[in-house]
Image (cartoon, helix red, strand yellow):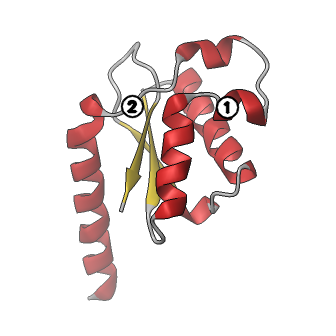
Amino acid sequence: MRPLRSHVAALLFFAAATALADDLPTVAPELWDRPRSARAVLEQPAVRDAIRAHLAAPGSRIVIHHGYGQNPLLQAEELRAWLMTLAVDAARISLINDVKPGESLKIEVVK
């Protein structure tokens, strides 16, 4: 019975996150046009604000919303790796492919 409950809870979490994806801060597409560094990633207001909010709220999660396809997924995975480098626990980062085609990555902190 427990696995079913956790599966339902995960579905509800992702459904709620998907409904809000249109209103979330975006990561500037220009970030992907040049080589990245921790500094360049942290200069992104959406990333900086998400990290601050996450660190201020123990138990929170960061959700990276991305589009379908190889490039959006690779960008989301790379952003996830940068967040881990910047002291965010990998277990507290989720990726969801719910962004419309052509839109930038979006980042959200879920408390």
Quadrant assignment for the C terminus:
bottom left
- Residue at image location 52% in from the left, 19% down from the top: 28
Residue 15 on image: x %, y %: 23, 50
Q: Amino acid at mark 2?
A: Pro
Task: Give the structural element (helix, strand or loop) at label 2.
Answer: loop
Q: Residue 104: which numbered mark, if any?
A: none
Residue 66 on image: x %, y %: 44, 32
The residues bearing labels 1 and 2 have C-alpha atoms spaced at a distance of 14 Å
- Residue at image location 54% in from the left, 15% down from the top: 29
Task: Give the structural element (helix, strand or loop) at label 1.
Answer: helix
| Count of number-bearing discs | 2
Q: Taking 58 as reference, is 75 above or below it?
A: above
Label 1 packing within 10 angstroms: few (<14), some (14-19), many (20+): some
Instruction: Tell me which label, 1 or 2, sits earlier in the chain.
Output: 2
Q: Residue 25: which numbered mark, if any?
A: 2
Residue 46 on image: x %, y %: 49, 33
Q: Taking 9 as reference, is 40 above or below it?
A: above
- Residue at image location 69% in from the left, 45% down from the top: 81
Q: Taking 25 as reference, is 63 above or below it?
A: below
Quadrant assignment for the N terminus:
bottom left
- Residue at image location 72% in from the left, 27% down from the top: 40
Q: Amino acid at mark 1?
A: Val
Q: Is residue 77 left or right of residue 36?
A: left
Q: Taking 71 as reference, is 46 above or below it?
A: below
Q: Mark 1 highlights which residue?
A: 41
Whether residues under marks 1 and 2 lie with C-beta atoms below 8 angstroms apart, the answer is no
The residue nearer to you, when weighing 6 against 41, is 41
